[in-house]
Image: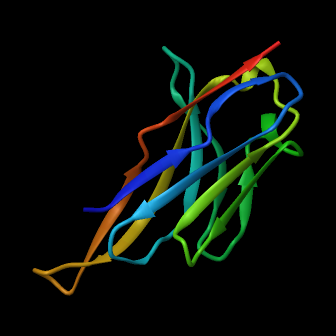
Amino acid sequence: QVQLVESGGGLVQAGGSLRLSCAASGSILSIGDMAWYRQVTGDQRDLVATITSGGNTKYTDAVKGRFTISRDYAKNTVYLQMNSLKAEDTAVYYCNAMNVVTTSKIASTVTYPKLWGQGTLVTVSS
């Protein structure tokens, strides 16, 4: 069973920082691009930042210069360092992993095209 487990959310004052983590568990051979999304209740899930398998990063304009996405390939983990937080950053944050290749007892490998974490709530008080 492959899953993404997020941690690090919580309540922080405006101007503060939080670091989110998302670890992929299971017999993983490789992971493609990874990303963080966020969703405010009633709204669509929006892309925040992506990091490719080669380490290239992209950010939505609203978080450029404040958020940093990174990954630890050995730990199959992606991070989101969030600095200078604003009230409008309040949302549930979800991690996403593409093309997760795992070992299988039935087949030699199994590829999961897209996986999502369960979400972690970030609340920024003004």
Point 72% across, 68% down: residue: 56
Would you identify the image quadrant in which residue 50 lies?
Answer: bottom right
The quadrant of the image that shows the C terminus is top right
Q: What is the x, y in percent for residue 45?
A: 52, 31
Q: Residue furthest bottom?
A: 108
Q: In this picture, is 36 found above or below 52?
A: above
Would you identify the image quadrant in which residue 28 lies?
Answer: bottom left
Point 20% across, 79% down: residue: 104
Is residue 87 toward the left or the right of residue 30 in the image?
right
Q: In this picture, is 36 found above or below 109?
A: above
Point 89% across, 28% down: residue: 15
Point 49% across, 51% down: residue: 96
Q: What is the x, y in percent for residue 31?
A: 47, 71
Q: How many marks?
A: 0
Is residue 80 toward the left or the right of residue 117 in the image?
right
Q: Residue furthest left?
A: 106
Q: In this picture, is 47 found above or below 29?
A: above
Is residue 43 toward the left or the right of residue 68 in the image?
left
The quadrant of the image that shows the N terminus is bottom left
Q: What is the x, y in percent for residue 124?
A: 74, 21
